[in-house]
Image (cartoon, helix red, strand yellow):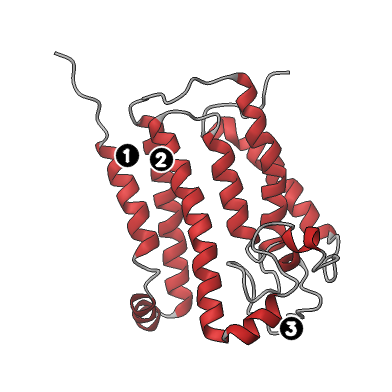
Amino acid sequence: MTAAPDWTGFAAATAAFLATHVVPARPALRRVLRERLGARTYMTLYTVLSIAVFAWLIAAAGRAPHVWLWAFEPWQLWVPNAAMPAACLLAAYGTAAGSPFSLGGRDGARFDPERPGIAGITRHPLLWAVTLWAGAHIVPNGDVAHVILFGLFALFGLAGMAVLDARQRRQWGPELWAGRTARTSFFPFAALLSGRWHGEGLRADPIRLAAALALYFALLLLHPLIIGVSPMPQL
């Protein structure tokens, strides 16, 4: 008699991922943890825990039974390879950006709504980087476990943007929100395409460009070592 496929490890890792992202998102709980642990200790512990759970989830998806929703085709590798340069640029420009909107941005005390910089492209560069990474990786990974894995990250990215915008709008009020976001975008390049923004405040920062390039090549080099599969399509 053949044993039934064991989804226990993947289910446990998925539950842990949801718990570590949903529970701390509750303002009251996060406030209590920060008060008791201290802000720096809380962030350090949460970052370590998030990385550990992320690694566990990736490994568990690889060990889960392969139930295919669609067959792999070599052309599918072009999708993440086309998306990842944009994701790396968004991550590099979004990290420590002077924007009050973005996850990973600074407090935005010097934010100029007339010259929004990266917020003119999108208010949420880091979350769009995660969403692009996850969404693009669904295409060449058509088994159930990986569709769930990358689908979760894409969903969390999109939901996180909506939550951050709603929270900021509630704190500022409709009038102030409208004034500060007039030249910004939720969807990448929407303000540019609509003519609401013409590139004010955004510059080709060589440090951020170098960081994006370094991140991209690091991911290419580490992918076969960590994941065990080359991300490069066959020419």
Of the numbered discs 2 and 1, the one sitting upstream in the chain is 1
Query: Who's the residue at 44% across and 35% down the image?
Result: 146
Q: Are marks 2 and 1 in contact (CB under 8 Å)?
A: yes
- Give how far across and how far down residue 2 sits, in percent: 18, 15
Task: Pinpoint residue 153: horizontal percent, then vertical percent.
Answer: 48, 49
Task: From the viewer's perspective, tell me whether residue 32 is left or right of residue 119.
Answer: left
For marks 3 and 1, give the CA distance: 44 Å
Give the residue pinned by disc 1: 10
| Residue at 57% in and 50% down | 131
Residue at which label 2 appears: 148
Mark closest to the chain's N terminus, 3 or 1: 1
Q: Position of residue 79 (x, y in %)?
A: 64, 33
Cα–Cα gap, marks 2 and 1: 10 Å
Where residue 217 sits in the image (x, y, percent)? Answer: 71, 40
- Mark 2: which secondary structure? helix
Please tell me how crowded label 1 is: few (under 14), some (14-19), or many (20+) other residues with Cα within 10 Å. many
The relative height of residue 28 versus residue 223 in the rendered view (above or below) is below
Residue 110 bears which disc, if any? 3
Residue 43 versus residue 191: which sits nearer the camera? 191
Q: Amino acid at mark 1?
A: Phe
Residue farthest to the front? 194
